């Protein structure tokens, strides 16, 4: 499997996605950019609103940093449809090159998807994530989230695999993204692109 380099350009423009079809040839799949937001200044949240219900899944690709003081790392989270109730569950598996750990956190009022860098991280270093929101428009099931995320701080860093659940059957029409706990802003140049997958 080929590995492509993640940059702000590829996060926004996307990679070609190939599906295996009946004659064993590869065909370009249908993955469309719905909205892309790059912050020109720090702000408290990022909003994707009026998400069309015409796709099977959603994907968010992000690079992010916060201005949380005294911290090398931070978490960026989201809420669906302005739901601030304790209706979210998060599981994680992470490693830093020398050790690994796992854990769960429920109930929560948001779900973590991006391990971002904080203000004490090396200047210009951002965390990144590729996050899938599965069957987001299906009104017969709770919504499942999975995210691969990590950061590098010039030799130190972590890789995270998050999984999450929003215990609600409503179709997702909006996503609010903000720093965990609302203790800091999302920093300038952080970038979030929302894709729809047919």
Image (cartoon, helix red, strand yellow):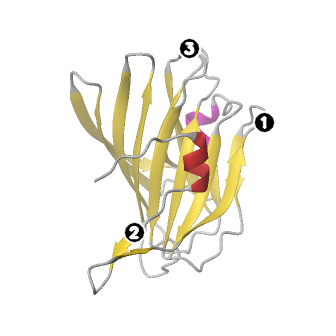
For marks 1 and 2 on the same chain, the one whose residue lies earlier in the sequence: 2
For marks 3 and 2 on the same chain, the one whose residue lies earlier in the sequence: 2
Q: Secondary structure at mark 1?
A: loop
Q: In the displayed structure, would residue 6 be above or below residue 56? A: above
Q: Secondary structure at mark 3?
A: loop
Q: CA distance from mark 3 to mark 1?
A: 20 Å
Contact? badges 3 and 2 (CB < 8 Å): no
Q: Going by the image, does 159 lie left or right of 64? A: left
Which residue carries the number 1 mark? 40
Check the image and name the residue furthest to the right: 40
Query: What's the residue at 46%, 73% (across, down)?
Result: 29
Query: What's the residue at 71%, 63% (across, down)?
Result: 49
Q: CA distance from mark 1 to mark 2?
A: 33 Å
Which residue carries the number 2 mark? 18
Numbered circle sitting on residue 61: none
Q: Which residues are magenta?
A: 177-182
Q: In the displayed structure, would residue 178 be above or below residue 134? A: above
For marks 3 and 1 on the same chain, the one whose residue lies earlier in the sequence: 1
Across and down, in percent, residue 139 comes to 49, 80
Q: Going by the image, does 144 lie left or right of 114? A: left
Residue 84 makes an appearance in the image: no
Which residue carries the number 3 mark? 120
Mark 3 or 2: in front is: 2
């Amino acid at each position: 499997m080929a590995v492509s380099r993640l940059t702000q350009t590829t996060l926004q423009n996307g990679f070609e996605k190939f599906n295996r079809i009946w004659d064993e040839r590869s065909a370009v799949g249908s993955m469309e950019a719905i909205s892309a937001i790059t912050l020109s200044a720090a702000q408290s949240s990022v909003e994707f609103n009026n998400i069309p219900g015409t796709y099977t899944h959603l994907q968010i690709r992000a690079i992010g940093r916060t201005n949380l003081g005294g911290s090398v790392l931070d978490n960026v989270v989201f809420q669906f449809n302005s739901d601030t109730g304790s209706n979210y569950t998060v599981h994680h598996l992470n490693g830093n090159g020398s050790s690994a750990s796992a854990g769960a956190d429920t109930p929560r009022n948001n779900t973590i998807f991006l391990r971002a860098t904080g203000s004490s991280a090396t200047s210009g270093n951002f965390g990144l994530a590729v996050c899938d929101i599965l069957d987001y428009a299906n009104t017969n099931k709770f919504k499942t989230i999975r995210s691969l995320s990590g950061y590098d701080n010039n030799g130190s860093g972590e890789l995270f695999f998050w999984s999450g659940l929003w215990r609600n059957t409503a179709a997702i029409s909006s996503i609010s993204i903000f720093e965990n706990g609302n203790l800091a802003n999302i920093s300038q140049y952080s970038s979030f692109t929302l894709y729809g997958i047919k």
